[in-house]
Amino acid sequence: MRDVAIVGAGMIRFGKYPEKSIKDLVREAVTAALADAGADPKVLEAAYVGSAAPGIMTGQEQIKAQVTLSAMGIDTIPMYNVENACASSSSALNLAWTAVGAGVFDCALVVGFEKLYDVDKMKSFMALGTAVDIERVHEFLAQVAEKEGGQILSGDSGKSKSIFMDMYAYYTRRAMEKYGLTQEHFAKIAVKSHKHGALNPHAQYQKEVTLEQVMTSPEVAFPLTRLMCSPISDGSAAVIVCSKEKAAQFTTKPVWIEASVVGSGRLGQDFDDTLTLRTGKKIFEKASVGPKDIDLVEVHDATSPSEIFALIELGLVPGDRAAEYIDSGFLEINGRLPTNTSGGLASKGHPIGATGLGQIHEVVRQLRGEAGARQVKNARVGMTHNGGGILGVDAAAMALHIFKN
C-alpha cells in the first residue's frame, strides 16, 4: 500500500442556501480545494462523490457526481457515486485512499455535498428518517422499549423533529446513570462546541452561548434541548488526495492518511456492542498509534451527548471520569484532548453527505497550522469519527480516519 496524502482541502460555510443548487455547492467546494492544492482539474484521474439524500430533496438521483462535476468542466474521468448515510463523504475518502494507495490512480478528487434545508421541514425530516430499516424500525424499537423499559419514539417523531432525536434521547437517558452524567454536563459540551464554532468562519452558527441558554432552550426530547442538537444544513466540502510522489508536486505540507476504516452495524439489541467500539479498535491497530497519541479529534456529535459517548467508546476518555473531563475543560482547544474544534455538528452544521469531509477539512487545517484562533498547539496526529444511520440500536455506517502531518 502506497502512502497517500491530502494536498488540498476546501469547503463552504455550512448553512441554509435555498437559492443555491447542488451544482453551486459542489463547484464552490471543489474550486476551493483545487486552489488550496494549486492544482489544475486536468490532474484529476478519478472522482468520488458522497451524498445521502439529494433524490428526496432535489429529485436528482443516480448520476449526482457526473451532473455536479460536469457543470464545472470536470468530465470523462471515472466517477463514483457514494451513498452511506451521514458517513457518505468519509466513505468516499476511504474508497479514494484505497485506490490511490493501491496504485490505480495517482490523484483523485473527493467531494461531499448535501442540500438538506427546505422551507417544508417535513421534507427534511423525511429525508433524515430514511437512514433506518424502513420496514422494521418501529416494530424493532417497540420490542427494544418493551425489553428495556421506557418509550423510545414519541408521537411527533418524524413530524416536528427527526426520528433520530428520540432515539438519541433514549440512548442518552440510558447512559446517564452508567457514566454519572447529568443534563448539565451535556449542556457544557454544547457551550464548548458553540465557543469553538464562533472561531470557525465555515460554521453555520458563529455565536457563543451560555449554560443557561442551552439549558433553557426548547426541549426536543429529554435530556436534549435545541442547542444540544445539530441543525438542518446545506453544505459541501472537498479534498484532493495524491500518492506520495504526486503530492510532492503540489505541497511541502502534505497531510498523510495514516489509516482509514469503514464498518457497518448489525441488527441487534445490545447497547454495549457498538460500531464505534468495533471500528475504533481497528483504526488504532492499522495506524499503529493509540488513543494517547491523538492530539485532536472531530467526532460525530449529532447531539452533544453523542460527543462524550463517542470519546468513551473510542477509548479517548475513560467512562468513569467522563464528568471530570467535561468539567475540567479537558476537551477544549487548550485542553489535553481538543474535541470538535470546528464547532462540531452542533455548531458547524450537519449537511449529512458533506459532514465527514467537513470534519476532515478541520483536521487538515489544524495539522497544517492554519486554523487561526482555534489552532491547537503542536498538533501532529488528528482523528475523525463519522457515523450514519441506525440499524437496530447500532449505527448503520461508520468511517474513521487518522491523519498525521
Image (cartoon, rainbow, N blue to C red):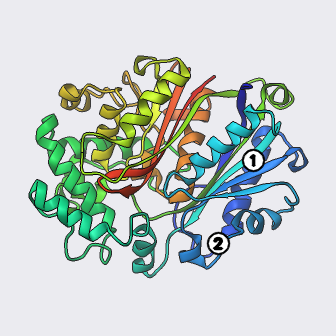
| Residue 305 x, y percent position in the rendering | 27, 46
Q: In the figure, residue 14 lies in which quadrant?
A: bottom right
**Tag count in the figure?**
2
Question: What residue is shown at x 42% (from left), y 28% (from top)?
Answer: 281
Closer mark to the observer between disc 2 and disc 1: 1
Q: Does any portion of residue 198 appear in the rendered image?
A: no
Q: Mark 2 points at which residue?
A: 20
Question: What residue is shown at x 78% (from left), y 38% (from top)?
Answer: 37
Q: Earlier in the sequence, mark 2 or mark 1?
A: 2
In the displayed structure, 146 sits above or below 269; it is: below
Q: In the figure, residue 9 lies in which quadrant?
A: top right
Identity of the amino acid at label 2? Lys
Could you tell me which quadrant the C terminus lies in?
A: top right
| Residue 345 x, y percent position in the rendering | 43, 50
Question: What residue is shown at x 57% (from left), y 46% (from top)?
Answer: 90
As measured in the structure, the alpha-carbon distance from the residue carrying label 2 to the one carrying label 1 is 22 Å
Q: Name the residue under label 1.
A: 109
In the displayed structure, 80 sits above or below 1; it is: below
